[in-house]
Amino acid sequence: MYEERVPADYTEMDLLEAKRFDKKVKENFMPAVISTVKQIIEDYGVLEGVCVDVGCGTAVFAIELCKHSKLKIYALEKEKAICEVARMNIEKEQLIDKIITVLGDAHDLPFENEFADFIISRGSYHCWQDKVQVFKEIYRVLKKGGIGFVGGGFGRYVTEEELNRMKSLRDHSLKENAKVYSSPDKLREFIYKANISNFRIIYDKEGLWAEIKK
C-alpha cells in the first residue's frame, strides 16, 4: 500500500518552529483553505475513496477537505516536525481514522501504482526541485478515472479584501518562489514533459491550478 520514507534532502526542523508555522497558516490563510475546499466539492461533487494530499503541511487543508467529503486521506509531508504537528491537529479534530500522515517526498511518492482516486497538492508546487518528476509520480499514483488538482490559490469564494491580503502575505513569504503561481505556461510545459495529455490549466485571479485526469 504505502511505506514511509525519509526524504533524501531531509533536514530536521524544530518542533516549536513547526508549531509557529501552523499558527501562521491558521491565523492568515484559513479563508483560502475553506474557499478552495468549497470550490473542489462544488466542481467534483462529494468525493469518495482514497485521497493523497501531496505536501500537506500541518494537515489544515486535509482536515477541512475530510470534513466535507467521504475521502480517506493520506497526508504526505517531507518534514518530520511538520508531520508531527499535522498528527496533533488530526488527533485534536478526532479524525485519526480518516486522515493518515505519511513521511515522504513528492519526488518519490511512497504509494503503489493507481493508489488514489483524488490527489490534491495546494501550495507545495513551488517547493519541488524537479517538477516534471513530481508530476510523473502524481500520474503514476492516480487511479484510472481519478483526478489530480495541483497548484496554488485562494478559491473562488474569498472576498476581495481576503484575496489581496493573502496574496500580499504569500508573495512576501515566498519572495521569488511566488512567481511560479503566475506562470501558467511553465506549469503547462512541466506537465507536457511528464507525458500527461489529459489536463487543463486553470488560471485566474484566485490562483493557478492544473486539473489532471487519468
Image (spheres, helix red, strand yellow):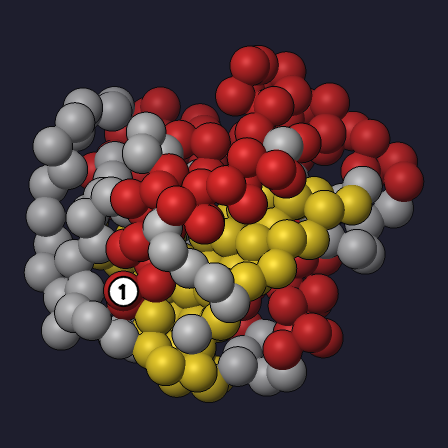
Q: Nearer the viewer, residue 32 or 43?
A: 43
Question: In the image, what residue type sits under mark 1?
Answer: Arg
Q: Nearer the viewer, residue 127 or 100?
A: 127
- The answer to whether one can see residue 172 in this image is yes
The quadrant of the rendering that contains the C terminus is bottom left
Snapshot quadrant of residue 130: top left
Nearer to the camera, 52 or 195: 195
| Image height of 114 relative to 53, above or below | below
68 versus 172 height, above or below: below
Q: Callout 1: 10 Å neighbours few (<14), some, many (20+)?
A: some
Residue 97 on image: x %, y %: 30, 76
Residue at point 44% right, 42% down?
A: 190
Front-lying residue, 98 or 40: 40
Q: Residue at x 72, y 75 (%)?
A: 42
Q: Does 155 sit above or below residue 160?
A: below
Location of residue 189 in the rendering, given as x and y in whole percent from the top left corner: 50, 41
Residue under the point 18% across and 64% down: 111
Furthest-right residue in view?
160
Q: Position of residue 209 (x, y in %)?
A: 61, 50
Give the labeled residue for mark 1. 140
